[in-house]
Amino acid sequence: MRFTIRDVLGLIALVAMGLTWGVDTWRQSAKIKALEDIAGLETLEIFSKDWDGLTAGVRNQNRLLRFHVVALTRELQSRGHQVEIDGCNVFVDRPIAKPAMSPTR
């Protein structure tokens, strides 16, 4: 059995794509875990069928969404945007124009 350079390069590309996907998935799950730890989420079983598990899941989603909204609001404000949240409505103005520095005498 003989392999051509094209076969070897194709195999290398396939292995590289698989490794890249695996590393990316691992990093994303580590980031999500860190954000959940920072947000103080409760641990619960996946697809819980009892009432306590379902309510804990809703609380987790609510906390995580609030955490993301606060982080996004801070980031937008640090970039000069005006952010207003009214219930489910979010209004974001364009960046606040900084006045040009006039030369002082």
Image (cartoon, helix red, strand yellow):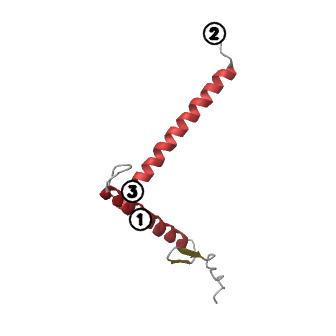
The mark found on residue 62 in the picture is 1
Going from N to C along the chain, the mark reached first, 3 or 2, is 2
Hey, which quadrant is residue 93 in on the image? bottom right
Q: Give the answer, above or below, for where 28 lies relative to 63.
A: above
Q: Which of marks 1 and 2 is in front?
A: 1
Q: Nearer the viewer, mark 3 or mark 1?
A: 1
Going from N to C along the chain, the mark reached first, 3 or 1, is 3
Q: Residue at 43% x, 65% y: name it.
A: 67
Q: Name the residue under label 2.
A: 1
Going from N to C along the chain, the mark reached first, 1 or 2, is 2
Instruction: State the residue in front, 26 or 41.
Output: 41
The mark found on residue 36 in the picture is 3
Q: Give the answer, above or below, for where 78 lies relative to 13.
A: below
Q: Distance between the residues labelled 3 and 2?
A: 52 Å
Q: Give the answer, above or below, for where 105 lies relative to 36.
A: below
Within 10 angstroms of label 2, few (less than 14), some, or many (20 or more) residues? few
Q: Where is residue 2? Give x, y as percent.
A: 65, 11
Q: Residue at 51% x, 67% y: name it.
A: 72
